[in-house]
């Protein structure tokens, strides 16, 4: 008899060994398996809206007593508790008889914690500087790289003067050529910390390897995982342990399912603040650096509760095309944008061709602010 294994991304050491990954073709057989052995699927225990903390705690204890892993997911009106780690049948009635439990639901997607089946309410990510949510539109802007202190401070000051609350800039840069500028590294992080201390702006910066996780976490308000690292599973596991939100860029040839599975690694590690970022995928197109896949936004919203940003700079590779794609991203349902902007793009040390100057950024910001209310969003 074939043994059916459910996908367990990360089981904490000491609780149980992770089950092997299922073969990719397994998921194509979901309906048949579901009918034959429905009890093998991970579950979501949905609490009643008036359930007390003690009742939630009791469900958590019952899940743990089964050797399974509970994930408490507080929602706007009720709490749900996701449950992963089962390799065999889990009896729904174990939970349904407990006080405060509304129902237990089985989850059918390969990603569990990232799916809407597990959490119906949109994830809202809160910062001192603002909130990423379906009713806001967040702009992250700044140069590709930290080049020196003066340009970061002047960029931060310009952004703050325009009400932009998030500064992007890489201290560690993933470059295709080892001879290209690799970023200022630790010195660059210090510059970003100075900009935050001086202006109060939130910092978005890339983490490229597990070695620098702690220093990047300290220096940033959002940890960026770049397209080339979307399937760096060691790095995903590490940021799952970080206490800062993660901006997870889509791999340049990743399917939606692969992208959400990458997010799943971070969520399964216990970090539920994940923001997806579409940055363009590789196609046969020769008119742009990448093909900005805005058509991924509605399916992301349908299948996941995670917020999604769009990066039209890497998506197009040309600054002239950035404004049009930014407006289109807002209209398509994105929750925010990440745009490269530089005080003097023609002299940028990386990605100058796709960077806006401050005047172009101001002009785009005015259009976004005028349009955002039409899409039910405040800026
Ligand atoms: C960047 O944001 O500068 C960057 C390197 O992005 P990506 O990982 O999408 O190429
Ligand atoms: Mn760049």
Image (tube, rainbow, N blue to C red):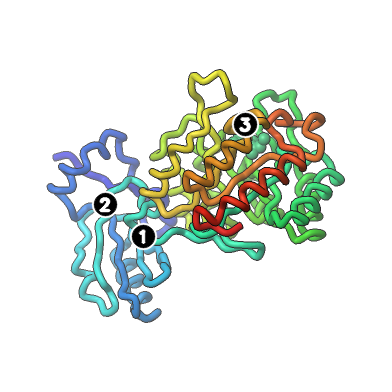
The span from disc 3 to disc 1 (Cα, nearest Å) is 35 Å
Locate ligand 1 by image quadrant: top right
Q: Residues within 10 Å of mark 1 (few under 14, many from 20)?
A: some
Mark 1 = which residue? 120
Q: Position of residue 67 (x, y in %)?
A: 32, 62
- The residue beneath circle 3 is 321
Q: Which mark is residue 87?
A: 2
* Image marks 3 and 2: residues in contact by CB distance under 8 Å: no
Element under label 2?
loop
Q: CA distance from mark 2 to mark 1?
A: 25 Å
Residue at image position (55%, 49%) is: 238
The C terminus lies in which quarter of the figure?
Answer: bottom right
Q: Position of residue 54 (x, y in %)?
A: 37, 81
**Tag in front: 2 or 1:** 1
Neighbourhood count class around disc 2 (C-alpha, 10 Å): few under 14, some 14–19, many 20 upward: many
Label 1 within 8 A of ligand 1 by Cβ:
no
Secondary element at tag 3: helix
Front-lying residue, 375 or 297:
375
In this rendering, the label closer to the viewer, 3 or 1: 3
Q: Is residue 12 above or below residue 46?
A: above
Q: Look at the image and tell me whether residue 248 can be seen.
A: no
Across and down, in percent, residue 378 comes to: 57, 59
| Sooner in the amino-acid sequence: mark 3 or mark 1 | 1
Task: Looking at the image, tell me whether mark 3 or mark 2 is earlier in sequence order.
Answer: 2
When asked about the image quadrant of residue 91, the answer is: bottom left
């Amino acid at each position: 008899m074939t043994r059916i294994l459910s996908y367990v991304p990360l089981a904490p050491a000491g609780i149980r060994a992770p089950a092997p990954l299922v073969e990719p073709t397994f998921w194509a057989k979901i309906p048949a398996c579901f009918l034959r052995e429905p009890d093998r699927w991970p579950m979501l225990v949905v609490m009643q809206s008036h359930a007390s903390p003690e009742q939630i705690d009791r469900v958590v204890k019952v899940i743990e007593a089964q050797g399974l892993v509970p994930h408490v997911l507080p929602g706007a009106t009720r709490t749900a508790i996701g449950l992963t780690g089962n390799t065999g049948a889990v009896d729904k009635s174990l939970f349904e008889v407990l006080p405060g439990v509304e129902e237990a639901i089985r989850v059918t997607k390969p990603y569990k914690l990232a799916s809407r089946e597990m959490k119906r309410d949109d994830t809202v990510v809160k910062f001192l500087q603002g909130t990423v949510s379906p009713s806001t539109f967040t702009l992250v802007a700044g140069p590709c790289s930290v080049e020196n202190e003066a340009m970061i401070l002047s960029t931060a000051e310009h952004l703050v003067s325009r009400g932009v609350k998030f500064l992007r800039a890489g201290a560690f840069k993933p470059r295709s050529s080892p001879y290209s500028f690799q970023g200022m590294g630790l010195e660059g992080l210090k510059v970003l910390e100075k900009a935050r201390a001086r202006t109060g702006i939130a910092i978005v910066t890339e983490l490229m390897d597990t070695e620098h996780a702690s220093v990047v976490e300290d220096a940033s308000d959002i940890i960026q995982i770049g397209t080339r690292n979307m399937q760096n599973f060691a790095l995903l596991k590490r940021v799952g342990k970080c206490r800062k939100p993660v901006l997870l860029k889509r791999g340049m040839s990743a399917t939606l399912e692969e992208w959400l599975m990458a997010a799943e690694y971070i969520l399964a590690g216990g970090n539920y603040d994940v923001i997806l970022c579409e940055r363009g995928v590789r196609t046969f197109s020769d008119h742009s650096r990448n093909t900005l896949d805005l058509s991924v936004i509605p399916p992301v919203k349908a299948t996941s509760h995670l917020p999604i940003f769009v990066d039209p700079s890497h998506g197009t590779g040309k600054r002239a095309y950035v404004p049009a794609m930014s407006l289109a991203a807002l209209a398509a349902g994105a929750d925010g944008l990440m745009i490269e902007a530089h005080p003097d793009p023609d002299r940028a040390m990386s990605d100058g061709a796709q960077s806006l100057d401050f005047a172009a950024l101001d002009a785009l910001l005015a259009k976004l602010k005028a349009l955002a209310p039409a899409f039910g969003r405040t800026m």
